Image (spheres, grey):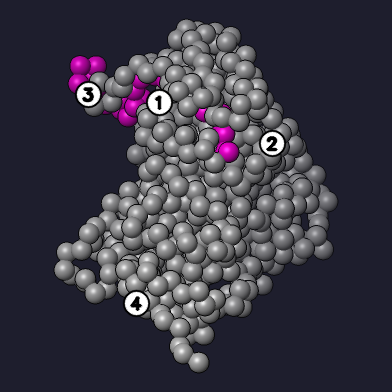
Amino acid sequence: MATPAIANTADDTLAKKSSDPNIVSGGRLVAKALKNEGVDTIFTLCGGHIIDIYDGCIDEGIRIIDVRHEQVAAHAADGYARQTGKLGCVVTTAGPGCTNAVTGVATALRSESPILHIGGQGALTQHRMGSLQDLPHVDMMRPITKFAESVRSTERIADMISMAARESFSGAYGPSYLEIPRDVLDREVHIDNAVIPKSGHYRASVKSIGDPRDIEKLADLLVKAERPAILYGQQVWSSRGHNEAIALLRGLDIPGYFNGASRGLLPPGDEHHFDRTRSLAFKNADVIVVVGTPFDFRMGYGKRISNELTLVQIDQDYRTVGKNRDISLGLVGDPGAILGAVLDAASAQIDNGKRQARKQWMEKLREAEQMALEKLMPLFTSDQSPIHPFRVAWELNEFLGDDTIYIGDGGDVVTISAQAVRPRAPGQWMDPGALGSLGVGTGFAMAAKLANPDKEVMCYYGDGSFGMTGFDMETANRFGAPYLAVIGNNSAMNQIRYGQISKYGEQRGNVGNLLGDIPFSQFAQMLGGYGEEVREASDIQPALQRAREAIQKTGRSAIVNIWVDPREYAPGTKNQTMYK
């Protein structure tokens, strides 16, 4: 029997694509490997270097979401990973396709989000000849990924993807990058010659509890503690350890604090949910456990925690434990597995006397929580005009449904809304994370809706943030993923503006940070959706309700453009805590 013809170049592929099912292209191998990883959706912007991947995705039943800018594709892959718990995937062409995605990949790195960035490259046969869009992608991506390599043979494509995926889920999660030259991707090979690791057979479990003796130590500390507190961070949700995290709080009667994606692990009003007394707790607790969040700028580099207490840190990454400040005990492993094991160990030695003391400790914190809320209420209910941004945040929280996924995209937008917005369930808070990237909202919103078609998605943008990536709202509409965009519009990059004015005065402080007065509602209308301008505080809630109804009716995204006072800032902005 004659051997089927195997295409070796792009031109040959177009002319001689084999009809033999055992002859597969590199693009088909990419898709097979992604499917083995549970990837059902890729986010991309087309380019000649990568089109064979699309061909493979069609064969493997993988959804292709094509956006208008690669930054949005990368943020969407990140958002999809956060919402599904699976590997997110962004596919870009070479050169500017890769560089446009850098911000999204770097955001995933600082947010510890598992994504795979597959990028095109000129043919190996044109190496160092100056091919179209040729850049040293791997060298560029290596500092902002956990793994970055070039695939040198078609037979190894699936093997290299499995390798990159392993790295993305090793220790603290994060992004990986694979460059695939055009001739390697387009070439066809016999499937028997391809290295394709079998799904479910090339990874160890990552649900490690570390040293069992440390589990016993932590259990003993918590059982004996009278004033404990626990802070849950990004890793608790991303590793899907939220059930164990909640069970530990309830099982031992410990107040819980939450940041990043862990917001929403407990609903507002739950007796173990605390959010306005963290400084007080960190000053007066006898034991604090910090889980899945680093001592970075958001934590004052750990300096805001008393040196007189017992401090325990749990993290997926050994390098993060004890970084920036000393700790009493460090545990490395999966947050959920560790917390579950600690509860099991502690349950056998419950001290009811200490437990009663913990209840009194929580009552004291609850009283302080109420006082803190009462102090904020004049801002939350302010009727001033222009609208106070704290009033917007309060109205957004009042608007949230039980299944609303809330996304914050901006500077003061995120920090102010964190004062008021309380998501009702796990996974329903998304923000830029430690990189502080503006423009994440559009990709996050699209991904959140695609991953959860039955949930409502709302993104609260600053006007500066919306201007960066907002045009991909059209993409969300095109793929049946409409969402509600709320814009806090002060016609400025206001968080930075405050610092400039404080440092240089009014005349020089308004340089490089003022934006135009844009009626963004018209943008939603241009795309066939609903848009409304709001200038009075009393009109916020009715406008939000009209937008919700319009999305349900039209299936298109809506924009509520709220004009807020540019003279009002978040407390952290006034104190410039992000730089301290």
Residue plotted at (49% across, 48% down): 65
Say if 302 sits above or below 556 in the image: below
Residue 375 belongs to magenta span: no
Task: Locate residue 556 relative to residue 99 in the image: left or right.
Answer: right
- How many neighbours does mark 2 have within 10 angstroms: few (below 14), some (14-19), or many (20 or more)? some
Query: Image quadrant for the C terminus?
Result: top left
Tags 1 and 3 in contact by the CB under 8 Å rule?
no
- Write down the residue under mark 2: 403
As helix, strand or loop, the secondary structure at mark 2 comes to loop
Sequence-first disc among 1 and 3: 1
Task: Locate residue 545 relative to residue 442 in the image: left or right.
Answer: right
Mark 1 to mark 2 CA distance (whole Å): 26 Å
- Residue 71 locus on image (x, y percent): 38, 46
- Write down the residue under mark 1: 463
In the rendered structure, which amino acid carries the disc numbered 1?
Answer: Asp
The circle drawn on residue 8 is 4
Sequence-first disc among 2 and 4: 4
Q: Is residue 419 or residue 274 the one in the foreground?
A: 419
Q: Is residue 426 or residue 195 the one in the foreground?
A: 195
Which mark is nearer the camera, 1 or 3? Answer: 1
Residues drawn in magenta: 480-509
- How many neighbours does mark 1 have within 10 angstroms: few (below 14), some (14-19), or many (20 or more)? many
Mark 2 to mark 3 CA distance (whole Å): 41 Å
Q: In which quarter of the image is residue 133?
A: bottom left
Mark 1 to mark 3 CA distance (whole Å): 17 Å
